[in-house]
Image: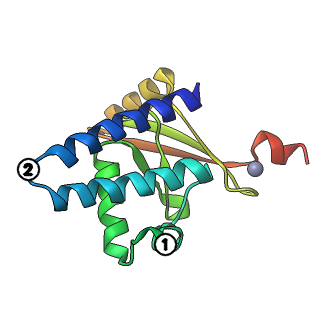
Amino acid sequence: MLRYFITKRLVVYRDMMTNLAAAPSGVTNRRRGRNRQLVLDVLERTKRPMRAYELLELLREDGLRAPLQVYRALEQLIADGTVRKIESLSAFALCTQGENRAAFAICSVCGHARAFHDPALDRVLHRLAGKAGFTATAATVELSGLCERCAHE
Ligand SMILES: [Zn+2]
């Protein structure tokens, strides 16, 4: 299921990139789209949250040299809901459904992060925020502990 969403998301991105490449505004858009795709590819491949400098290290060979290139790509991916910042790790993770609320289960041993969405969790967060007179526009819940594999080792 998770794999399906990632694949679907990447297909959407590939289509977007094709559209950008065809747009007359050209080089800038194309490069921006390419950087986003590179960042997405790394996050998809590693299956764990990555810090910006780790992404930069891995993408150096692909021509990304400046931290700003990575931050801009991340900013755009966050804006469209594809990537979430995991505050507790100062890292970024793929969020396979572009929703305003997400929860991540983060393994403190192997670093694997699994994103999940649950309408019941959404309702609880909404209710808690409402009780505090707060209008939440987005929420990221971070659970830390052991993934199934690490828990059995
Ligand atoms: Zn683990």
Near mark 1 (Cα within 10 A), the count class, few <14, some 14-19 or many ≥20, is: few
**Observer able to see residue 56:** no
- Tag 2, which secondary structure? loop
Residue in view at x 26 percent, y 58 percent: 32
Residue 50, picture quadrant: bottom right
Q: Position of residue 86 (x, y in %)?
A: 49, 55
Instruction: Report if the CB atoms under discs 2 and 1 are less than 8 Å apart.
Output: no
Q: Position of residue 61 (x, y in %)?
A: 49, 72
- Tag 1, which secondary structure? helix
Given residues 35 and 124, the one toward you in this image is: 35
Q: Is residue 119 above or below residue 148?
A: above
Residue 61 - label: 1
Q: Is residue 73 above or below residue 2?
A: below
Q: Quadrant of the N terminus?
A: top right
**Observer able to see residue 104:** yes
Residue in view at x 23 percent, y 55 percent: 30
Report which residue position mark 2 lands on.
24
86 left or right of 153?
A: left
Q: Position of residue 65 (x, y in %)?
A: 38, 78
Q: Amino acid at mark 1?
A: Glu
Given residues 35 and 83, the one toward you in this image is: 35
Residue in view at x 49 percent, y 51 percent: 41
Given residues 36 and 26, the one toward you in this image is: 26
